[in-house]
Structures are given as structure tokens and as C-alpha cells.
Amino acid sequence: MFNSSLVAYPKVRLRRLRKNQAIRDLMQEIHLSKKDLICPIFVQEGISKPVKIKSMGEIKRFPLKNIDNEIESIIDLGIKAIILFGIPSNKDDNATSAFDDDGIVQRTVRHIRKNYGEKLAIITDACMCQYTSTGHCGIVKNKTVDNDSSLQILGKIATSHARAGADMIAPSAMMDGQVHAIRENLDSNGFTDTGIIGYSAKLASPLYGPFRDAANSYPEFGDRKSYQMPFTNRNEALKEVETDINEGADIVMVKPAIPYLDLIYQIREMTTTPVCAYSVSGEYAMIKAAALEGWLSEDNVMTELLVSIKRAGADMIITYHAKRMAQLLDE
């Protein structure tokens, strides 16, 4: 008969591995790095100085003439990548300013590439919501966003960005077949080395509100639920990711990030394709607002949430906290 009194029971105490900061650092499993961070930048035509976005704390829209200070601060902090969003002066039904070689994003890309070389990876958002008079992410026909005519415009946008010098194109319109259409357009114009980050699992979320303030991109009618996917559907999200990979996406994205850590984890488990998470404007704004009221520590909560995204499996994170996080990583 087994006699438990004769067995020396090992006293397992995991707290031994937490007793001081040096030991906690030694045992740390997930490491967030500056190299994981992608910093969003809004560039706007028709303004003469940076303009703060009321719903987004310290985030600003920049005129091209003032972009250098922002770019230099990002480089000095050791951040290696940016994603550009343009706000044009003119909008129309066909989003023509989105693919104009003299458009705001195209001019900004050329300026950054000329003055800063390859110090930064330049990613450009390819969408139409900022550029269409309807505020929708595609071409509207009879009060409906038309998928196939929108694909033609997305191809033109992507090629114009690549021609300006963008390293990667990130199509966020959520049109079916957008990665394939952009890959074909880029390749046929000689931009075979320009990468694509698919907004693969982009959920129809209320957390985009502050971004729509920033980009002046609220839809004129209806909503975007016919092309952004339902946040209730896990299998549909995985199918979207699989489709983008098959169409040629070099990186796939989950957006928003915090409510969908489960999707990030599942996608990481199902593919070796790099995974990007976009921690969106609403996630940022909630932390900023609560911190302003003194309800929580902004730095501590920001760090915990970004680490959770990395722990779930993201290889890189687009975040409005990028600059502050980079500062903390230096401390």
C-alpha cells in the first residue's frame, strides 16, 4: 500500500521565480520590441500646421511641410515602420485623388523616401473612404458598394503608391478579391517586390470611431457591415485570412486587436504567414480617456495590452501608442 508519509513532497513555489525584478526579467517569456511597432501617421492637404484630433489625445494630422519633425522623432525612437493615411482636399464619386500621382500620400511617400532613404519601412493604406464623396470604402452604384469596380480603383491606388516608393500596400477596403487584384496590378506594372499586408480579418467594429474623426471618413449613408465582417464569426474570419494568403498576401492582419486576441492566436496556429495586429483608434482613445480621469495608469495599461497582443501571436502591431511605447522600452 502506498504510504504518503514516506514520500518527501517537493514544495513547489512559483513565487521563487518572481521574488525580485532581476529574476522576473530572467524568466520573462514574451518580449515586446521597438521592432514590433508600426506607427500610424495622418497627412492632410489644405492645412498649414499640425492639427490635434480631439478624440485621439496627442495624435495629430500633419501637413506635408511639417512631416519631417514627426518622421525624425519616430526614427530617433528606434521605430522601424510607419503606415500612412491621407486626407485629401477634394473628394468625388470615383476617389480619383486616391490614385493621383500627385496625391497627398504619394507626395508624402516620395518625400520620406528621398530624405530618409530606407531608415523606415513605408506602408500605405489603400482604401477609398477618405477620398469618396460617399465616405464608403468602395465605388457606390445605386446606394450599394460595387465590389468589382472598386477592385479596379484599388489596383490603381496600390500602383500609384508603389510608384511613389512604398514598401508595402495595406488594402483596407474589404472588397472580395482585393489582394489578388492588387497583386496582379503591381506585378503587371513591374512592382513585383512591393509587398501586401492584407486587412484580412477586419471586423465591423464601433472602435473605429476616432479614426473616422481623424480621417473625415464617416459614410454618408448606411454603414460598412456589407463588406466589413461580423465580429460574431470566427470561422468566417479564418476563411478571410486563408483567402488573402491564397491571393498573395505577404502578411495578414487582424483589426481591431484587443477584442480579437482569440483570432490572432488561431491564425498564428494555422499559418506561418506573418501576422499583424492593428490596435485601433478606439482602443487607444479608451486608455487615454480613462488615464485623463485618473482611473488607471496609461503606461502600465498600454504595456499590458500591447504585450497581450504579442503573446497571442502577433509578429507586429500597428498602434497609436507606438512612440510612447518606444520611449518606455528605453527606460
Image (spheres, rainbow, N blue to C red):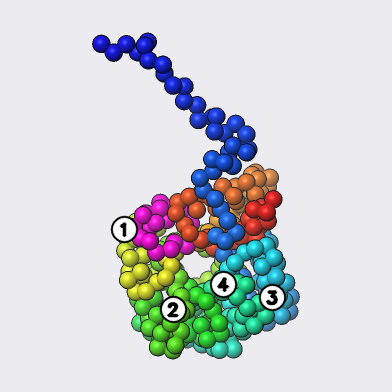
Instruction: Give the CA separation, mark 1 to mark 2.
Output: 25 Å
Q: Is residue 164 visible?
A: yes
Residue at the (58%, 38%) spot, across then down: 24
Nearest to N terminus: mark 4 or mark 3: 3
Q: Nearer the viewer, residue 226 or 33?
A: 33
Looking at the rendered structure, the secondary structure element under dot 2 is loop
Labels 3 & 2 near each other (Cβ < 8 A):
no
Q: Amino acid at mark 2?
A: Gly
The residue that mark 3 highlights is 67
Residue 224 lies, with reference to residue 5, above or below; the image says below
In the image, the segment drawn in magenta is: 256-277
Instruction: Give the CA separation, mark 4 to mark 3.
Output: 16 Å
Instruction: Give the CA separation, mark 1 to mark 4.
Output: 32 Å
Q: Is residue 22 magenta?
A: no
Q: Is residue 150 left or right of residue 67?
A: left
Q: Amino acid at mark 4?
A: Ala
The residue that mark 2 highlights is 138
Q: Quadrant of residue 3?
A: top left
As drawn, the label of residue 121 is 4
The residue that mark 1 highlights is 235
Instruction: Give the CA separation, mark 3 to mark 2.
Output: 28 Å
Nearest to N terminus: mark 4 or mark 2: 4
Q: Quadrant of residue 71?
A: bottom right
Q: Nearer the viewer, mark 4 or mark 2?
A: 4
Q: Position of residue 184 (x, y in %)?
A: 38, 83
Q: Nearer the viewer, mark 3 or mark 1?
A: 3
Residue at the (39%, 75%) spot, across then down: 179
Residue at the (37%, 74%) spot, across then down: 248
